[in-house]
Amino acid sequence: MKTAARLDHIEPFYVMECAKAAREIAQGPLCDAARGGRPMIYLNIGEPDFTAAPLVVEAAARCMAAGRTQYTQATGLPELRDAISRWYRQRFGLAIDPARIVVTAGASAALQLVTLALVDAGDELLLPDPSYPCNRHFVAAAGGRAVLLPAGAEHRFQLDAAAVDAAWGSRTRGVLLASPSNPTGTSIERGEMRRIVETVRARGGFTLVDEIYLGLSYNEAFGHSALEHGDDVIAINSFSKYFGMTGWRLGWLVLPSALVSAVEKLAQNLYICASSLAQHAALACFEPASIAEYERRRAAFRARRDFIVPALDALGLAVPVPPDGAFYAYADVSAHAANSWDFCFDLMRRAQVALTPGRDFGPHAGERFLRLSFASAMPQLEDAVDRLRRLL
C-alpha cells in the first residue's frame, strides 16, 4: 500500500528500537535467575517510577462511580483551566488568563495542535541539536522542516539568541525549544531566554517552549517559565512528569489569546477533547497534599541526580553539563568507545544495563553521547553503577 510522502521525513524512533532489544535480552539466559542470570536494569526510558498521587487516583474512582465521563469542551474543563492558572500564579508568580489555556491529550497532542496551527508546507523551525526527536517530527508531520542547530556543552546544549539570529532565513517561522531539555536535563538561563524571545519577536516569528519538565527543576536560577517574557510566547506542558500521570495522556498549552480559537477548532476535529476522566482526576493534582507529595518526589529525583552524575564521571562517562532539571544525564562515551550505539548494546548484553544511545537526539554529536534516565529508584541506580564499574 502506498503511504503518504510525509512519512519520508519522519525517522524511526531509535529509542524504541533499543527498548525492544533490551526486552529481548531480558528474556534470554543472561537475565534468567534460574540459570544464574540477573534482571535487566532499565535506565533507558524517561518515565517516572512514581505514579499518580493518591488523591488523583481517588478522584478518578469517584468520577467513574458518578458516571462523569462525558465529553468536555475541546479546550478542557473550565475548572481545570482555572486550577492550572492558579498553579502558574502560586509557583511562578505569573498571571495567566485561564482563557489562554487549552487542555490537550498529552503534550504530544499539544505539539501537534500548535504546529498544525502555525506551520505551513516548507516553513522552517529552529531547534537545538541535541533535542527530543519527536519534536522535530511534529514539525515534519505539519509539512514543515526542522532545522537542527548544533548546541554543545559550552552552550549548555541549548540555543542562544546569537545562534537563532545567525540561522534565521527567509523560510524561518520560529523556534521550538525545551527547557529543561530531554535528553540533557539542561535549561536556558533566564536572560538568554528573554534575548531569544526578543530576537524571534523582532523577526515576526513565534517562540514555542516545551516545559513538560519545568516542575522538576532543581536550581532556582533555571526554574522559571518562558511565559514571563510576553503573552506571545507559547508554552507546552504536561501532567506526565512532575505530576506522575504518564499513561493518563493529559497536557496543556498556554497560547496567545488570538490563537486559542484556531487551536480549539483543530482539537474539536482531531480528537474532540482530552479524556474527561483524566481531567476530573487531575483537579486533585493541585490539592496541597498532592503538591507536597510532588515536592517530596522532586527532592528524591534531585538526590538521584546528585548520586548518578558523580558516579558516571568516576566511570569515565563524563557528564559535561550537570542536569538542572528533568531526570536525564547526557554522558560522553568517547573514553570507552567510538560510538554510543555499539557501546549501549554492549552494556545491555554484558552488564544487563539498558541506556539510550544519542543517535535519536541529533546528528551533531549523537554518536558520542548516551542518555541515562535516573527516573528509577536509588537501589537500581546503585546496582547499575556497580555493574558498570565492574565491566568498565
Image (cartoon, rainbow, N blue to C red):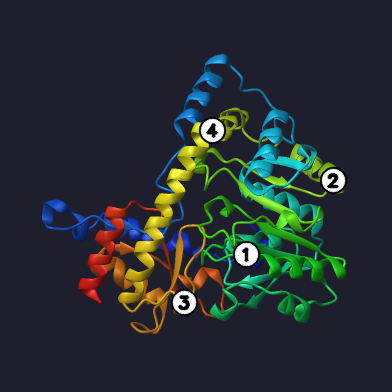
Q: Pick whichever of labels 3 and 2 is earlier in the sequence.
A: 2
What whole-number distance in Å separates the C-alpha atoms at marks 3 and 2? 40 Å
Amino acid of disc 2: Ser
Helix, strand or loop under label 1? loop
Relative to 108, residue 349 above or below: below
Q: CA distance from mark 3 to mark 1?
A: 30 Å
Q: Quadrant of the N terminus?
A: bottom right
Q: Which residue is mark 4?
A: 288
Instruction: Residue at 77%, 56% (x, y): give it.
Output: 233
Q: Give 284 or 62, whichever is nearer the viewer.
A: 284
Give the left or right position of residue 387, taking residue 306 as reference: left
- Asked whether the viewer can see residue 103, the reply is yes
Foreground mark, 3 or 2?
3
User: Within 10 Å of the Cα at label 2, are there few (<14), some (14-19), or many (20+) other Cα atoms?
Assistant: few
Looking at the rendered structure, the kind of residue marked 3 is Pro
Q: Which residue bears the numbered disc 2?
A: 257
Q: Which residue is mark 1?
A: 10
Neighbor class of circle 4 (other Cα within 10 Å; few <14, some 14-19, many 20+) is: few
Where residue 391 sits in the image (x, y, percent)? 22, 74
**Direction from residue 151 to residue 183 in the image, left or right:** left
* Residue 320 tag number: 3
Label 3 or label 1, whichever lies nearer to me, is 3
Element carrying mark 2: helix
Q: Residue 262, image x and y in percent?
A: 83, 45
Disc 3 packing (10 Å; few <14; some 14–19; many ≥20): some
Q: CA distance from mark 3 to mark 4?
A: 37 Å
Which of 90 and 307 lies nearest the eye of the viewer? Answer: 90
> Disc 1 versus disc 2: distance between alpha carbons?
31 Å
Question: Looking at the rendering, which quadrant does residue 88 occupy?
Answer: top right
Query: Which of the 4 image quadrants contains residue 374?
Result: bottom left
Residue 147 appears in which quarter of the rendering? bottom right
Placement of 202 over or under 63, stated as above or below:
below
